[in-house]
Image: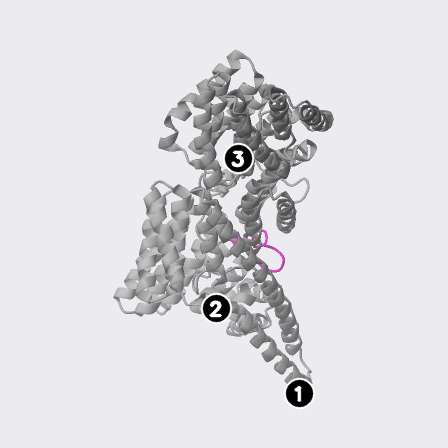
Amino acid sequence: MSVAAVSASSASAEGFLALADEADRRRDFSAAASCLESALRPPHAVALLPLAEARARLRLAALLLAPRGSSPAPRAGAPAAAKAHLERALLILSPLPSAPPRLKLLAHSHLAGAYAVLGAVPSQKHVLHRALGLLASASASGLLQRGPALLWTCNFQAQLASALTVDGDAASALSALSAGGTAAAELGSPQLELFFAASTLHVHLLCWEDSAAVENSVTRATQLWDALPAQQKEHWVGLFFYIELLRTFYLLRVCDYKAASQRVDRLDTAAKSELQRGQHIKELANELRAVERTLGQPGLKERERSALSHKQRQLKAQLRALCGYDSLADVLDYGDKLLLAPPPMHGEWLPRTAVFVLVDLMVVMVSRPKGIFKECGKRINSGLQLILDELVKLGIVDGVTEVNLEPSTIWTAGLYLTLLLQFLENKVAVELTRSEFVEAQEALAQMKNWFARFPTILQGCESTIEMLRGQYAHSVGCFDEAAFHFLEAMKLTESKSMQSMCQVYAAVSYICKGDAESSSQALELVGPAYRTMDSFVGVREKTCIIFVYGLLLMRQHNPQEARNRLASGLRIAHQQLGNIQLVSQYLTMLGTLALQLHDAGQAREILKSSLTLAKTLFDIPTQIWILSVFTELYRELEERGHEMENYEYERKKEDDLQRRLSEAYSHVFHQELVEKSRIQIQPLHDMSRMQSEMAGPTANGDLDIPESVGLSAPQPSLKRLVEQGSARRSTRRLQ
């Protein structure tokens, strides 16, 4: 190439870089990326100095990886292109003595991020270990000062912990977080200390191998949060949601529903406030972009330019006041993120919309056991709409299946799809409680449809769907089919908790069949669980096991022992769970036993309380059960008037239930939901690609909290936090 040609190429390359700078200032990121791509194409690229080329590739990769506009994920092909630019940048920088250490570290950090988006976990871990080695070398040689070195340590340890958690190596992830937390403490950064404490709690909740370690982790995170000045708490919005949601998950796990409800109220208030703040920021940011675009136009008169500059300063001041701790650049560049940590980390847990959806889900979870169905319905609908909007942004519309997904969208898609199934699961539970069988059918059919379209991503949800099919079948009186689905659900999960609940549900269905052989099958399921329940199950499981064991004792004509057992279960259900459906069913059984033991006065009072709760829940089968016991009570007391009045009311409820059941039996989804077969999945020709890109084990329904962007669990790891409905209400056949 001639000297003139080289000079022209160099001038063109510098021109493109200058144009990229200008586009950056205008926040026209598409134009900035196009200018950088032009500068890096032949013949311009050869004219760039190595350091300039590496910087340009780093800038372009950052633009390609950042979600922009309405999309919650980078555009198709962008992560792979970013990875290629970053690998080239590292090749240039590694042998370059004049390259600043910060630039090399930034390249490693961005490349690890690109590998994470693409699901290349082994490559991600490799580049992070190499980065930590480079960091140690730069620190030892004095090329990097202590403060920046500690900050980079925090960054790489956080990224490494995320990769290790995806790989299922919780112990190594905790070790990385401990190293990061130590560096944060040395740095004197309370925000980073809290970030690492919260992340440690997150990993403990995901694996939950040592209850004492989990409790200590909760205490540590709480102490650090409580020690923060009030102003910092208000500013660190992302950390607030992260900490509060993790502590709420912990309280739900240990069944402290009273404390969990208080935290959910706090979260709900904060979410509403943050939603308003975010909308205001978005409006001001759009206005600022319009002003800056106009300022970038040539030929503006001095007066116009002065007025626009003044408006620009005003808008920036308003935005800074709204942004809190996060810098203006962070808010404008990163859009819908709730940031957890300062640069170079720019960490987030979940996308902002997913956090709001999760708060809606928490409200549903604490409201449903109390029978607050109106609020549940409102939150389920709002959560579903938010999720569907996000799925459309990801390109998930009718006809799209998981083989059509871009690698960069798989994680985000998995997050929203699993949340979607959690909302539908709660909808099924609410509608079955209210005896709205057709509504429950439709929600359950939607769950089946989503699972059939995304079977790898939603693999961990299959056991939940099977269990809900059992719940539906039991509710409409198909007890044999119900037991089949409960036992299939038990085979599909490794969770001891889930397995014990499936055994309980199957046992209830066997008992409701009413024959001696079925009662024997029920005892085979519940007996071992009852004898060992104190050693391996939680409060929810224990109350349900006691409930079914009490049913069996009643069937074995041992009313006094059944009464003692059920009274102990009622105390737990009332004091710890706050699940009024389960309390209502316990009371109904205790009222029945009181009548059998000829304690009519106590039976009357207990049954009144039970009927009040069943009416609150619109639980028609339980109401019928209670009314039938009342009829027997009035007959024994020879209160003929009350007996006839009660019988008429019971008959009306029976007619209502039969009408609902007839509608359910004739509905299009009934047969496919109750039939004794698992969901049939069409073989996917590209299943191996999907599994490799999901980075680590496929969907594991046994984990207890949603995974994080900063700390991913094995994909997609969103098990239901919701308590399953109590052992399904007994029907008249139980009588």
Q: Residue furthest bottom?
A: 302
User: In the rendered view, would you say 561 is above or below 445?
Assistant: above
Report the residue at 65% width, 73% height from top: 293
Which residue has dot 1 on it? 302
Mark 1 and mark 3: Cα distance apart in space: 75 Å
**In terms of sequence position, does the residue under pointer 2 or pointer 1 come before the other?**
1
The location of residue 151, given as percent across then percent down, is: 36, 64
**In terms of sequence position, does the residue under pointer 2 or pointer 3 come before the other?**
2
Q: Nearer the viewer, residue 484 or 110?
A: 484
User: In the rendered view, would you say 112 is above or below 419?
Assistant: below
Q: Are marks 2 and 3 in contact (CB under 8 Å)?
A: no
* Mark 3 neighbour class, 10 Å CA radius: few under 14, some 14 to 19, many 20 or more: many
Magenta region: which residues?
A: 67-80
Residue 583: assigned label = 3
Report the residue at 43% width, 68% height from top: 51
The location of residue 352, given as percent across then percent down, is: 55, 56
Query: Which of pointers 1 and 3 indicates the residue nearer the eye?
Result: 3
Numbered marks: total = 3
